[in-house]
Amino acid sequence: MTVPPSPSSSPSTALSPPPGNRLPPVVHVAGVTLRYGRKTVALDNVCLDLPARSMVGLIGPDGVGKSTLLSLIAGARKVQTGTVEALGGDMTNPAHRDRVCPRIAYMPQGLGKNLYPTLSVEENLQFFARLFGHDAPERRRRIDDLTHSTGLHPFLDRPAGKLSGGMKQKLGLCCSLIHDPDLLVLDEPTTGVDPLARAQFWALIARIRRARPAMSVIVATAYMDEAQRFDWLVAMDAGRVLAAGTPADLLARTQRDTLEAAFIDLLPAEKTRGYEPVAIPPLPVDEHTEIAIEAQDLTMRFGDFVAVDHVDFRIRRGEIFGFLGSNGCGKTTTMKLLTGLLQASDGRAWLFGHAVDPRDISTRRRVGYMSQSFSLYTELTVRQNLELHARLFHVPEASVGARVMEMAQRFGLAEVLGALPDTLALGMRQRLSLAVAMVHKPELLILDEPTSGVDPIARDNFWRLLVALSRRNRVTIFISTHFMSEAERCDRISLMHAGKVLVSDPPEKITHDKGAATLEQAFIEFLVEAGSGASLGPGTPHASETSASSVSSVSPVSSVSSDSASGPHPPPARETLTGVTLTQHKAFSLGRMTSYLWRETLELQRDPVRATLALVGSLVLMLVMGYGISMDVEDLRYAVLDRDQTTLSQNYALNIAGSRYFIEQPPIKDDTDMDRRLRDGELALAIEIPPGFARDVSHGKAVEIGAWIDGAMPMRAETVQGYVQGMHQNWLADQSLHRLGVRPTASLNIETRYRYNPDVKSLPAMVPAVIPLLLLMLPAMLTALSVVREKELGSILNLYVTPVTRTEFLIGKQIPYIALAMLNFLLMALIAVTLFGVPIKGSFLTLVSAVLIYNVVATGIGLLASTFTRSQIAALFFTMIGTMIPAIQFSGMLTPVPSMEGSGRLIGEIYPSTYMLIVSRGVFNKALGFADLGNDFWPMLIAVPVILGATILLLNKQET
């Protein structure tokens, strides 16, 4: 096959817009290279100019660099090498990014990834409108206009997490358009939605472009039929640009009829060598053909939600049966029901005449399942993955090696048997997943979107394998897909929507029965009849008007209004490329900060787990620590081994029994009994009185009494030793008085008195220390989780691509947790006074003031931990380590800070918990006020700007 020379073969030459577009490019990319880690090259010396006031499409499979390039253009990702200019300025310049941020809208890849699932449609839109500085009347006007035009207005109160895939994409688009951007960046906005929702989405974009002709749109898509409607296309592969031009240009250049065929021709020769289109021979069937799968009224409920609603179908042996529908329509759930991974709520299903039973392993061995995400063990090699799955499906041990080699040869894996799955190309990983599913030679193969994200050649190669399995080995194939071109290859397909099967027939029959030009148009007709059209906005075109096949290619300036297209266009200043004057970006906006505060408060109210942890967690821990951790050494169990058995020895034993510190246990029988009871923890103290004790005492001889103490807890053992010595001295003094009539005297008598805690009880000492400990740990953890959770969900992109500053973001996130921490303090103080009986003797206002400052520090530590962690588990770990260890070990909770030395003393002197402990103990136990504790406020006040300043510096405003 002859491959036309790619314009990107000369890296120094940028691919430019056509001469007819006199505007400067909306985006200029020169020499851009970006790597993930050391090996993965996402973009490789990309040079590109994208025309202004046009709809530009980036086409290609997953992993070719489309999303990376879009994130660089939107300013969401940091440029590593090269130049990226958008709207007339360098996106590596922070000042330019701040200025143009309000003019760029970025909708990331993934259904509703820039949305907040617990917030309603109204609240999501209000949040984004607030971020861009609209006042209340303007917010209302814009929200009403957008929701009416998209059909979302009836669902303003519905949480975003409960919207369908298509509605999520519409809401994401509305949030992006709330501020009238000049550059709209959409990263695969229709992936995973049904054809009707996809048509509605593009109709909405077309209406917006007609209303705002100066707006430029850049879209990444894997659907070639969608790309047909764009003004300008950029074909990408392996991080490089293959070609750029209008759809008509690319078709003319490759002399192909479809963009998918054109894209294949544009690929490098080494990828297309030996490629041939897929040919599918007819399936030989008759009335005797065995039924592989049958379902009758198959239903699956999750609570009140019906995921699969009375599904019926029959699939014949050797048939390729396609399952089509949007994400969330029930395809994957149906497949799990058929494999026995889920137990149906109602209805029945049969595999090869046997009822599906999750406990029937013999039937499940006849099924191979390839999940939507590759179910491979990344730490095992290709060979080890195949061997493992062969043994899991009870392939005879003597046959495992031969079976692995058979699969490797059949699926083209022989040369990579020693490689790890993560090092393989996407198409090769796909073949490995298929080989793993086939290693036990099942009769039924269930494939859940197996070709999602791969290039057309890898997809066709994969289909050739499926056709061979179906026609040669009579393997029944049940496959779900989003691609209509794949659906047309199936013997029969089922169209599914909202858990129901709308139709099951051969693709050509479905198209013919609806009188549609394409299968996609027929699917849209079925969806409209099923009621999906009820939520359409006004003016949405008929399916036939929005399908890709009926949209002709237009020139890059065809959507520009007549006044801008006629006559010569003087080149505008780069700062006003689209006629919009740049406004000065505010360094700090109270409105943007309160937007995040408002949103975080709403999410806290609607997240029962976080709300419970925030309000109840500290109280439970305080009760556990207050009652479970005690420094009091009392109620110690002891026993006596009396080898003398005289009146005097019994008198000695009774001296101990009268102490409030000890509880007497049955006497010890012998040395073995004493050793056993000490070892088992039954005794803390064993007293051994030697034989001849009374006789030796009467004769004035030295007598040794054994006191065996359990030393497993050294501090308690030392205290017990002191108790025993004190009681021994008291007994000697008592014997001296009663036997000799002489009271022992000392030249110096010391009387000990304890101030602040005269009974030397644990609770008055523990409670003032536990409160600062809990106020440090839990608020820090919750605050760290609030930021890291956004990283995991992807909504952190809203920080990267909106005008909000790092300071506004952090303070807005922090304030709700400060308020929660203050409420927790009040509840803990109430428990301390009422339940533990520890009164607040000093100035309560002083304590509250210190706690407020301390809570700012604690939540700041949580924010600081969130800057270098990417998962909630890591955030919990680092926050726990960073708060508990210094607070317990170095802040004076157990050992006074002045008694420490070296680095421990240094940590204690600078750590804020040290001074909060001083204030807490001073107010609770010593009746102190601000006049006495004022100097201890300063270290905590100094810590506030230090911690927040470090957090602001470490928090990235771009993804790195």
Image: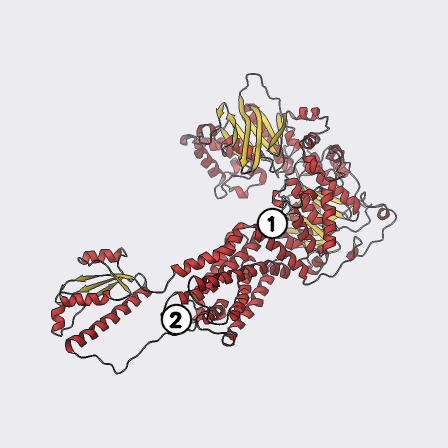
Residue 103's spot in the image, x, y percent? 73, 53
- Residue mark closest to the camera, 1 vs 2: 2
Which residue is disc 1 drawn over?
Answer: 794
* On screen, residue 23 above or below 305: below
Residue 777's spot in the image, x, y percent? 49, 60
* On screen, residue 498 above or below 558: above
Which residue is disc 2 drawn over?
Answer: 757
Residue drawn at x 43%, y 73% as measured from the top left = 898
Q: Secondary structure at mark 2?
A: loop
Q: Secondary structure at mark 1?
A: loop
Residue 685's spot in the image, x, y percent? 25, 62
Residue 400's spot in the image, x, y percent? 44, 32
Q: Amino acid at mark 1?
A: Gly
Query: Residue 87 has which mark?
Result: none
Task: Report the side of 278 relative to 344 (left or right).
Answer: right
Task: Report the side of 220 relative to 661 (left or right).
Answer: right
> Is 748 in front, or is 441?
748
Question: Is residue 31 in view from this perspective?
Answer: no
